Image: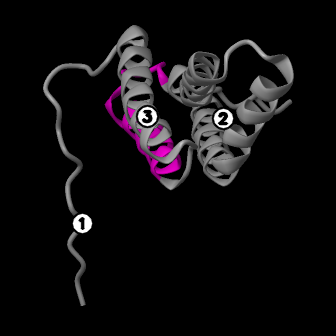
């Protein structure tokens, strides 16, 4: 019984720099979240799914050393997109703005938690691999 393993997709070049990861993740999140907010008047499964996809894409297509940026950017980009949309639609009313902002964050909380746990696991695992073992005395 033999199993065949699919080879990883090879990309030409070393991959995206930190700036490229941030820009692409932010653009994808802003575009899809903006569309969902516009048509559904709230964030939901599409935004959460895109959040997970851009995290995986940032880890996969980034250069060595870009994992931290790929993990940190999606929640910040999502929060900035939602806050900007809420300011444009609700205005600067603090009570309503805060309520709408927290509701949008809460609606994709499972996706945020799952992608954050996975991303931080990958980041910390890479850090542990880079560390050299201590010599025994």
Residue 59: image tag: 3
Q: Residue at the far left: name it.
A: 12
Residue of label 1: 5
The reply to whether dot 1 and dot 2 touch (C-beta < 8 Å) is: no
The answer to which image quadrant residue 124 occupies is: top right
Residue at the spot 83% in from the left edge and 18% down from the top edge: 94
Residue of label 2: 124
Q: Nearer the N terminus, badge 1 or badge 2?
A: 1
The stretch in magenta equals 46-66
Q: Is residue 70 magenta?
A: no
Work out how far the residue at label 3 is from the one at label 1, CA to CA, in angstroms: 21 Å
Q: Nearer the N terminus, badge 3 or badge 1?
A: 1
Residue at the spot 50% in from the left edge and 38% down from the top edge: 37
Task: Tell me where residue 23 appears, x and y as whole percent.
Answer: 39, 15
Task: Tell me where residue 8 appears, x and y as whole percent.
Answer: 23, 49
Q: Secondary structure at mark 2?
A: helix
């Amino acid at each position: 019984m033999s199993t065949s393993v699919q080879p990883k997709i090879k990309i030409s070049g070393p991959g995206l720099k930190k700036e490229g990861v941030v820009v692409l993740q932010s653009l994808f999140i802003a575009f899809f979240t903006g569309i969902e907010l516009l048509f559904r008047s709230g964030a939901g499964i599409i935004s959460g799914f895109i959040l997970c996809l851009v995290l995986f894409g940032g880890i996969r297509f980034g250069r060595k050393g870009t994992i931290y940026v790929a993990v940190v950017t999606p929640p910040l980009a999502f929060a900035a997109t939602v806050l900007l949309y809420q300011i444009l639609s609700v205005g600067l009313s603090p009570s309503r703005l805060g309520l709408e902002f927290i509701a949008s964050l809460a609606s994709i909380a499972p996706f945020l938690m799952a992608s954050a746990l996975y991303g931080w696991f990958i980041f910390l695992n890479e850090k542990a691999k880079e560390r050299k073992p201590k010599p025994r005395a």
